[in-house]
Amino acid sequence: MKIQTRFGEVELIDEGQVGYSFGSQDNKYQYPSEINFSEEPRPPVVLGIKLNSAPLIAFGGYGIGIQIGPHLSIALSDRLFVVFKRWLICIDLATHQLLWSIEADPINCFGLYHSSEHSALITHGELEVARFDEDGAKLWHTSGADIFSEGFKLEPDSILVVDFNGTKYRYSYDGGLRMA
């Protein structure tokens, strides 16, 4: 997946498919920064991020693969926000530095969304929906009766989520309170 930023083109790559090993000189791309959220030198899931075709940073984690898609990252101002496995990550595109990472869901994140009218970064997790500010503070999080796997939509006045059983949840932007 590629997105345009004021710093150039950002590309997200599934490096786990090619057997990326942290610290190895044998990888196709040499990332100047590697953050391994797993304890294995060769984690099963690896996300590589390139800026203007140059390797920038790689993240490793547990579980099964990742699906590179339109809701994996968002560029706002000079920052790139990325969901990877259960983490929300922020990278400064001007300095190429990792600013912070925080657990956004206990299991896995399906997507990252932004509502400019509410100045809200919203993560769609397997078990939780959460709102963050741009500095990584978790403002609220909420969950439902089952996995949030059947739908997610930012609406003008609320966040609509559908769980595995088809139950619909509508949450407020302000406090994550369930609305009727």
Image: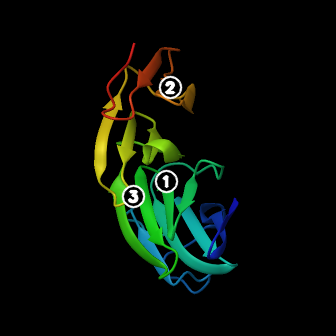
| Image quadrant occupied by the N terminus | bottom right
Q: Do the residues labelled 2 and 1 touch (CB within 8 Å)?
A: no
Residue 125 visible within the image: yes
First-in-chain label (2 vs 1): 1
Give how far apart the Cα atoms at labels 3 and 1 are.
Answer: 13 Å
Identify the residue shown where x is 43% and y is 61%: 89
Residue to which mark 3 is pinned: 134
Q: Where is residue 118 in the image (x, y as percent from the top left)?
A: 44, 42
Residue type at tag 1: Val
Residue 115 visible within the image: no
| Image quadrant occupied by the C terminus | top left
Q: Position of residue 15 (x, y in %)?
A: 62, 66
Residue type at tag 3: Glu
**Mark 2 nearby-residue class (10 Å; few <14, some 14–19, many ≥20):** some
Residue to which mark 1 is pinned: 83
Q: Would you place residue 107 above or below residue 68 in this image? A: above
Residue to which mark 2 is pinned: 160
Q: Where is residue 172 in the image (x, y as percent from the top left)?
A: 38, 28
Q: Would you place residue 68 above or below residue 135 in this image? A: above
Residue placed most toward the observer, 81 or 36: 81
First-in-chain label (3 vs 1): 1
**Mark 1 nearby-residue class (10 Å; few <14, some 14–19, many ≥20):** many
Give the SS element for disc 2: strand
